[in-house]
Amino acid sequence: MHDILDVLKGRRSVRKYKEEPVPEDLMEEIIQAGLYAPTGMNRQETLILKITEPSAVRELGQINGKLMGREGFDGFYGAPAVLCIFSRRGARTGIHDGCSVLSNMMNEAASLGLGTCWIHRGKEQFETPEGKELLKKSGIDGDAYECVDSVVVGFPEGEIPPAGPRKEGRVFSI
Ligand SMILES: Cc1cc2nc3c(=O)[nH]c(=O)nc-3n(C[C@H](O)[C@H](O)[C@H](O)COP(=O)(O)O)c2cc1C
């Protein structure tokens, strides 16, 4: 059992992954961490879409890369799994809730020795025709929910360098 602060300080964004799939029980632990994240007024309206089917992960990664303006680039860095977080459209704390879920899951994954990276353009990736098709397959109602962002998960390939120093002057007190 690691001290939580050690886990938080040790977590880094990983952008190179082994092909090896993430064992189902570890994915479940990460999802549990997301389900226990705080949400505004405890509404728990966020949804988590787990994608581990290799062709679907790669397809969405390509969509994401293209949205970055990099056609043919895997925006998911070869990770074997992605967790996409959805909030109810128009929900007052939808983005905040989604980020809360994302953070919890990333930190849980780090505590399990897995690598993650927060991936932006979640909303846009499910607005493409291919993204809409994937969403339909998942059973999530795209009219009622929109993706906040995603987190890719996998075993890191290579060393993870320690975090750099924190910027000064970011804490105030009264
Ligand atoms: C809102 C948000 C969006 C991000 N989007 C991306 C992204 O699309 N692709 C990526 O490689 N990293 C993305 N990141 C990861 C950041 O670049 C990373 O957290 C930051 O550089 C600090 O590095 P660290 O996570 O290793 O501490 C995102 C992070 C946040 C919080």
Image: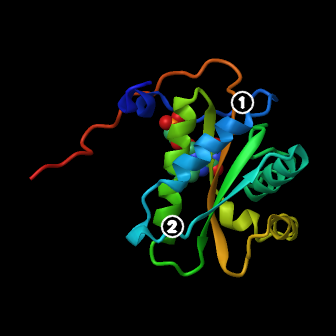
Residue marked by disc 1 = 16
Where residue 168 appears, as percent x and y from the top left, is 27, 37
Q: Circle 2 is placed at which residue position?
A: 44
**Residue 155, image quadrant:** top right
Instruction: From the viewer's perspective, tell me whether residue 109 is left or right of residue 49.
Output: left
- As rendered, which of 166 and 174 lies closer to the eye? 174
Q: Amino acid at mark 2?
A: Gln
Q: Identify residue type, mark 1.
A: Lys
Ranked by sequence position, the earlier of labels 1 and 2 is 1
Q: Residue 48 at x, y = what percent? A: 65, 59
Residue lying farthest to the front in this orientation: 25
Label 1, label 2: how many angstroms apart (C-alpha)?
A: 32 Å
> Closer to the observer: label 1 or label 2?
2
The percent position of residue 140, horizontal first and vertical second, equals 74, 70
Which quarter is ligand 1 in? Answer: top right
Residue at the spot 37% in from the left edge and 27% down from the top edge: 3
Q: Residue at x 54, y 81 (%)?
A: 90
